[in-house]
Amino acid sequence: MEIVVDNSAGGDEQFAEEVARGLRERGLAVELRPASPTAIFDTGVHLVAAGLVVRVSERPDRALLEGIEEVVRAALLHRPSLRRRTRSVPVRFREGERTIEWIDVFD
């Protein structure tokens, strides 16, 4: 199983690093994709995107998916603002847009 914490469209580097670190602590091999310098800022309004995607190379079994969810939820609870704590993080299959599971703090 290959896991990618894909922050290429986002601007919350600390969140992405915390998720990657938490997954590694569970013994998983994780690639961390940093935010693309061209994706962070919308030059018209200078907004930072907040997107983070966890990508998996194959469909995770229930135990692995629950482990990923625990790590993401714990990292969300450490965010400095309510807006950042209440976002949802998709788990997607490979490089596609097909979402296997949405993770947030409300489940």
Image (cartoon, helix red, strand yellow):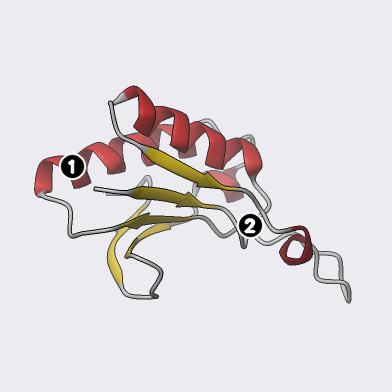
Disc 1 marks a residue whose amino acid type is Leu
Question: Which residue corresponds to the image point at 29% horizontal and 42% vertical from the top-left?
Answer: 68
Disc 2 marks a residue whose amino acid type is Gly
Is residue 60 shown left or right of residue 38? left
Q: Which mark is residue 79?
A: none
Q: Which residue is label 2 attached to?
A: 10
Q: Which residue is label 1 attached to?
A: 64
Question: Which residue corresponds to the image point at 56% horizontal and 60% vertical from the top-left?
Answer: 51
Question: Which residue corresponds to the image point at 45% horizontal and 29% vertical from the top-left?
Answer: 21
Residue found at the very far left of the displayed protein: 62
User: Dot 2, crowdedness within 10 Å: few (<14), some or many (≥20)?
Assistant: many
Give the structural element (helix, strand or loop) at label 2: loop
Residue 74 seen from this side: yes
Question: Which residue corresponds to the image point at 35% horizontal and 48% vertical from the top-left?
Answer: 3
Report which quarter residue 44 is drawn in.
bottom right
The number of callouts visible is 2
Give the structural element (helix, strand or loop) at label 1: helix
Report which quarter residue 100 is drawn in.
bottom left
